[in-house]
Image (cartoon, rainbow, N blue to C red):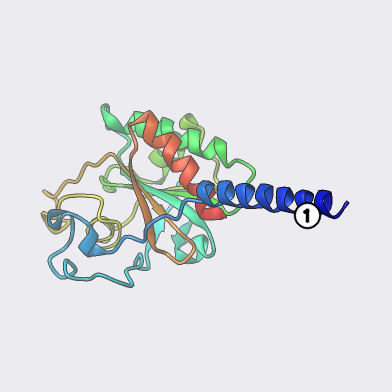
């Protein structure tokens, strides 16, 4: 009887260890990206040596409903950012459609939000963004499609999200165009960079968001 009990205890311990091992493998720890982790050309010269403590800077933008959007709207949220423009006929429609897929995956999750910034804010005013957002299936409570001061937006792209090659200063001739989706955690840290036109990357970002939530 003692032998059977010992055997059963050993078996239960083995099963527990196997299950624990499986659970550990399933939990993917995402990296925290700092300026030094990116290619130098993607990072503003003033930040290239920074190896720790990078967070997204405060911002003030105008969304598709004419409301001012700041960091406060994303407090304690995980969110995905991209840069686009409504008249783009190449990668932007694909990116927006893929962002909609991610939105659908977290439709009932209030912790997950989205932020799109227009790189042609002089063209993409509130009424243009409103029509675009409605046509594409943007849900206002989850996703802000924004315009604003061009220099401010371009500074965010180059100094906060590292989404584009470091050129220009946000003047009239300056133009950025990137397929990147950037994953931001609740502490305003970059946790992932993805190709917003790539189906495999869209699957990966959904998995990574779930991992980040856990």
| Coordinates of residue 112 in the picture (x, y in percent) | 54, 50
Visible residue check, residue 14 = yes
| Coordinates of residue 198 in the picture (x, y in percent) | 34, 31
Disc 1 secondary structure class: helix
- Relative to the observer, which residue lies in front, 213 or 163? 213
Q: Which quarter shows the C terminus?
A: bottom right
Locate residue 121 relative to residue 109 in the image: left or right: left
Residue 57 found in image quarter: bottom left
| Coordinates of residue 47 in the picture (x, y in percent) | 19, 69
| Coordinates of residue 174 in the picture (x, y in percent) | 13, 50
Visible residue check, residue 141 = no
Please rate how many residues cluster around mark 1, counting C-alpha atoms within 10 Å: few if below 14, some from 14 to 19, many from 20. Answer: few
- Relative to the observer, which residue lies in front, 69 or 196? 196
Q: What residue is drawn where x is 38% and y is 31%?
A: 200
Q: What residue is drawn where x is 45% and y is 55%?
A: 29
Residue 36 found in image quarter: bottom left
Residue 120, compared with residue 154, is above or below; it is: above
- Relative to the observer, which residue lies in front, 60 or 177? 177
Query: Of all residues shown, which one is farthest toward the right?
Result: 1
Residue 150, compared with residue 89, is above or below; it is: below
Q: What residue is drawn where x is 39% and y is 63%?
A: 189
Locate residue 113 relative to residue 150 in the image: left or right: right
Q: What residue is drawn where x is 27% and y is 27%?
A: 89
Locate residue 45 relative to residue 186 in the image: left or right: left
Location of mark 1 (residue): 6
Residue 2 found in image quarter: bottom right
Badge count: 1
């Amino acid at each position: 009887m003692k032998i059977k009990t010992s055997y059963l205890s050993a078996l239960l311990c083995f099963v527990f260890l196997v299950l624990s091992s499986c659970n550990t493998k399933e939990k993917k720890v995402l990296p925290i990206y700092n300026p030094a982790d990116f290619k130098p050309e993607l990072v503003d010269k003033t930040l290239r040596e920074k190896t720790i403590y990078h967070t997204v800077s405060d911002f003030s933008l105008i969304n598709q409903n004419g409301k001012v959007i700041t960091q406060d709207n994303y407090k304690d949220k995980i969110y995905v950012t991209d840069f686009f423009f409504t008249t783009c006929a190449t990668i932007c429609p694909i990116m927006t459609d893929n962002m909609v897929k991610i939105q659908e995956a977290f439709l009932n999750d209030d912790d997950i939000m989205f932020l799109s910034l227009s790189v042609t804010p002089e063209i993409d005013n509130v009424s243009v963004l409103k029509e675009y957002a409605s046509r594409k299936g943007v849900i206002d409570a989850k996703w802000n499609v924004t315009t604003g001061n061009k220099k401010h937006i371009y500074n965010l792209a180059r100094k906060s999200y590292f989404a584009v090659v470091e050129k220009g200063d946000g003047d009239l001739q300056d133009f950025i165009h990137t397929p990147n989706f950037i994953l931001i955690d609740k502490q305003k840290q970059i946790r992932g960079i993805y190709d917003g036109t790539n189906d495999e990357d869209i699957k990966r970002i959904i998995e990574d968001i779930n991992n980040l939530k856990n």
